[in-house]
């Protein structure tokens, strides 16, 4: 789990090769963010659609289907689909091809704001203008799109998607795979349930349950969502546990740290 702004710690010698898995809109946005960061060199995209193979996309090429990942053992990876559900299924498939969690990059656009009190997990991407204010926790394979604002103590569990211009007030928790549609806002202290979807422009003033679609102002439950991905693709025990309050500890030698 990286704290604050990510540095290229893999080789210490120039940009790290990066493969985008999937060639859709978020994958191309992530490629641009990776290039802008200077931390990554975009090798290309992998996508199972043969019609795309060889095509120049987002300043690189679609190199072939997902199985080709074996040919790039030194490249770091980022899952491209916009839906967390699809990212979870793809990650499971890649695991079957021998890809471990240590292969995933964390991509942060240089115009995203990530203070040192915030953490961002592997496989996650923050696009330009994303602002994390203080003590924000972003899990694994999370996508935070342009100009989203995550205020103090927000927690995004694995596979969450936060679309452009979303605003999350303090202590909001988005459980695994939740999808927050563009420009929605969520009142402080609320939870958006696992694999739920909040519609564009919604104003969420009540807890959202698991597997529900909410829309409107104020938001109401309108139907059930597609729900979680197949069991085998579900996240391992959460990397993002309940927030444990941090308090100063003195070591008796005049030094203080947060425990
Ligand atoms: C809420 C949402 C999931 C509903 O999608 P859907 O189930 O396919 O529903 P439909 O588009 O068929 O619309 C059903 C009804 O809900 C209304 N509706 C759709 N989206 C709405 C929204 N965000 N807020 C309020 N009402 C909405 C429609 O006008 C329609 O009303 P009607 O039955 O009176 O005509 C979808 O519109 C949405 O907001 N998705 C998020 C999109 C997004 O953020 N994309 C970002 C991509 S990066």
Image (tube, grey):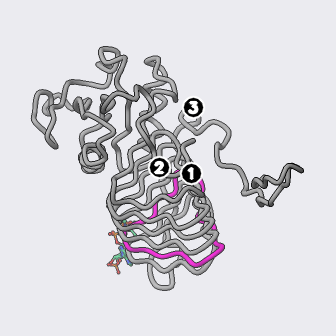
What residue is pinned by disc 2? 142
Q: Which residue occupies 19% across, 25% down?
A: 63
Q: Considering only vertical position in the picture, is 18 above or below 87?
A: above
Q: What element carries label 2?
A: loop
Point out the stretch of residues depicted in magenta.
175-192
What residue is pinned by disc 1? 119
* Classed neighbour count for the residue bearing mark 1: other residues with Cα under 10 Å, few (<14), some (14–19), many (≥20): many
In three-dimensional space, the C-alpha distance between marks 3 and 2, rounded to whole angstroms, equals: 19 Å
The quarter of the image holding the N terminus is top right
Residue 170 image point, x, y percent = 60, 73
Count of number-bearing discs = 3
Residue 150 image point, x, y percent = 50, 67
What residue is pinned by disc 3? 232
Mark 1 or mark 3: name the one nearer the start of the chain: 1
Q: Which residue occupies 42% across, 36% down?
A: 105
Q: Give ligand 1's quarter of the image.
A: bottom left
Which of label 1 and label 2 is nearer to you? 1
Report if residue 180 lies within the magenta region. Answer: yes
Residue 21, quarter of picture: top left
Report if residue 154 lies within the magenta region. Answer: no
């Amino acid at each position: 789990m990286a704290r604050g702004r990510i540095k290229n710690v893999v080789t210490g010698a120039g940009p790290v090769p990066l493969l985008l898995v999937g060639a859709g809109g978020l994958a191309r946005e992530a490629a641009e963010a990776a290039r802008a960061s200077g931390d990554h060199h975009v090798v290309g995209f992998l996508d199972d659609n043969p019609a795309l193979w060889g095509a120049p996309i987002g300043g690189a090429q679609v190199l072939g289907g997902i199985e080709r990942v074996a040919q790039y053992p030194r490249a770091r990876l980022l899952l491209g689909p916009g839906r967390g559900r699809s990212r979870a299924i793809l990650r499971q498939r890649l695991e079957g091809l021998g890809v471990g969690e240590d292969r995933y990059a964390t991509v942060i656009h240089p115009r995203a704001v990530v203070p040192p009190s915030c953490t961002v997990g592997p496989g996650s991407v923050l696009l330009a203008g994303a602002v994390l204010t203080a003590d924000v926790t972003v899990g694994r394979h999370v996508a935070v799109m342009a100009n989203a604002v995550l205020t103090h103590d927000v927690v995004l569990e694995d596979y969450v998607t936060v679309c452009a211009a979303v605003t999350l007030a303090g202590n909001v928790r988005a459980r695994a795979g939740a999808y927050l549609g563009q420009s929605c806002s969520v009142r402080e202290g609320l939870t958006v349930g696992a694999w739920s979807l909040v519609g564009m422009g919604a104003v969420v003033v009540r807890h959202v349950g698991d597997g529900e679609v909410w829309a409107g102002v104020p938001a109401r439950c309108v139907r059930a969502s597609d729900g979680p991905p197949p069991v085998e693709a579900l996240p391992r025990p959460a990397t993002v546990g309940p927030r444990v309050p941090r308090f100063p500890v003195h070591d008796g030698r005049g030094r203080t740290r947060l425990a």
